[in-house]
């Protein structure tokens, strides 16, 4: 039986670095070769075995036994995965390592790579060159040239509206698109997301650009260790700066407009209710990728990650409907089903012999230029900038790696979730 919510379900583990390193570095053999020119039309007979041999096999992988609920019927996605966010156990998967076009779910890697670089109060005046190269028909948040935005504004644009314009402005701040792509590919390798190859930082369709359900889940798990990532991923709506205009008195004023998260399990839609316990993460949709989505949710003290790529059913919001059904199955199966693999730790954590714990943002740790003035814990909403939060997915409560005397490590694998499903009252 799952432990009740808000109780300690995992005790602190003290083990030697050598033993942990040996245990955590095992499942990295036989990674698939470099990405082909285009994603394959059918799942390859041999795929990456990162995370376990069964995850490299085509088709559905699950250990059904007595007491384990059957998988939902009618799943049409080309690839999907259900994993325990805390332990990293993969409960079930379908073509987990099939390299497919990722669409805007790739923005999770973009955010995980760039979020630590600037405090949220950093300001940037947008130049015409910043928006060069934004693909035709891209999703936009509505950034205006020659206007100044904070980094906080830009990340809201990335997470809520999947704004490719916001991605390109942040990339320009990071030395350009080419440099950003290089850093994203390097970070993917560090995370052992070896199915992933980045060409465009916003996930816009590009030749050779691929990822997999396994990798997107791995990337989401890494991003969710970051306070700011958790905040932005769980924000339902926010105020975004508009353009500067002259009022009737001739004075320049700058208005704002509301943006809402396009993640339908978070914000809801006519045929998709808000999913109980949902807290992000990112959706996408392009011609090559179809609909893609990675979500994190908590129920009954369990935290699950689900990724669904390219459902073949041509129905409204099908990617969210299939995700919700996989979440439902996962919460029923957790603690009963034998896992078929695991989400591996980053290479640096594997070498150190520890799994990653929640990390501080620049505004917390005073990195990249110091803490933001007046910053508040993300568990208290709303935050500055007009954000209407719905509670933060994975609140920080310790769990950072601590080096102890004698070469042993203290590791907390629990992600405390006191505010995950808190709902703000709505009119």
Image (cartoon, rainbow, N blue to C red):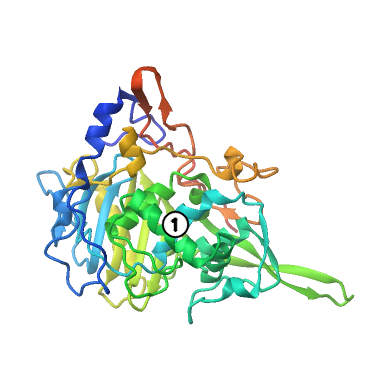
Query: Can you say which quadrant of the picture contains the N terminus?
Result: top left
Q: Is residue 412 visible?
A: yes
Q: Which residue shows up at 13% across the image and 58% down it?
A: 57
Side of 270 where 174 appears, left or right: right
Residue 285 point in image, percent of width and height: 39, 72
Question: In the picture, residue 325 is in which quadrant?
Answer: bottom left
Q: Is residue 424 visible?
A: no
Q: Which residue shows up at 15% across the image and 59% down it?
A: 60
Residue 35 point in image, percent of width and height: 26, 66
Query: How many neighbours does mark 1 have within 10 angstroms: few (below 14), some (14-19), or many (20 or more)?
Result: some
Side of 136 where 238 appears, left or right: right
Q: Which residue shows up at 26% across the image and 50% down it?
A: 330
Which residue in the protein does label 1 denote? 183
Residue 100 point in image, percent of width and height: 28, 68
Residue 258 vs residue 182, the one in the foreground: 182
Is the residue 346 above or below the residue 46 in the image?
Answer: above
């Amino acid at each position: 039986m799952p432990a009740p919510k808000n109780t300690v379900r995992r005790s602190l583990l003290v083990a030697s670095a050598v033993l942990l390193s040996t245990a955590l570095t095992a499942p990295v053999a036989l990674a698939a070769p470099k990405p082909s020119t285009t994603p394959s039309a059918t799942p390859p007979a041999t795929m990456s075995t990162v995370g376990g041999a069964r995850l490299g096999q085509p088709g559905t992988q699950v250990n059904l036994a007595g007491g384990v609920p059957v998988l939902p019927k009618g799943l049409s996605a080309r690839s999907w995965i259900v994993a325990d966010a805390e332990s990293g156990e993969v409960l079930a998967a379908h073509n987990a390592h099939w390299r497919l076009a990722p669409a805007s779910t790739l923005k999770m890697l973009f955010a995980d790579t760039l979020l630590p670089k600037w405090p949220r109060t950093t300001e940037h005046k947008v130049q015409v060159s910043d928006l060069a190269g934004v693909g035709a028909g891209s999703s936009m948040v509505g950034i205006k040239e020659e206007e100044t935005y904070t980094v906080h504004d830009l990340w809201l644009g990335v997470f809520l509206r999947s704004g490719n314009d916001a991605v390109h402005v942040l990339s320009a701040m990071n030395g350009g698109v080419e440099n950003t792509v290089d850093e994203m590919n390097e970070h993917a390798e560090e995370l052992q997301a070896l199915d992933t190859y980045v060409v465009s930082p916003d996930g816009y369709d590009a030749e050779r650009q691929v990822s997999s359900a396994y990798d997107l889940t791995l990337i989401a798990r890494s991003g969710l260790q970051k306070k700011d990532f958790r905040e932005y991923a769980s924000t339902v709506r926010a105020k975004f700066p508009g353009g500067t205009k002259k009022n009737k008195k001739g004075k320049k004023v700058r208005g704002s407009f509301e943006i809402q998260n396009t993640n339908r399990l978070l914000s809801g839609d006519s045929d998709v209710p808000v999913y109980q316990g949902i807290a992000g993460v990112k959706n996408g949709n392009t011609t090559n990728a179809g609909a893609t989505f990675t979500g994190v949710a908590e129920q009954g003290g369990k935290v699950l990650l689900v990724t669904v790529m390219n459902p073949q059913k041509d129905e409204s919001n099908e990617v969210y409907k299939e995700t919700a059904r996989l979440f439902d199955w996962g919460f029923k199966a957790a603690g009963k089903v034998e896992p078929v693999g695991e989400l591996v730790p980053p290479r640096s954590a594997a070498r150190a012999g520890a799994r990653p714990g929640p990390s501080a943002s620049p505004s917390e740790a005073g990195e990249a230029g110091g803490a933001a003035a007046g910053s508040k814990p993300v568990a208290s909403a709303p935050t500055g900038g007009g954000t209407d939060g719905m509670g933060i997915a994975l609140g920080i409560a310790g769990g950072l790696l601590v080096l102890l005397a004698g070469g042993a490590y203290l590791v907390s694998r629990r992600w405390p979730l006191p505010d995950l499903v808190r709902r703000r009252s709505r009119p």
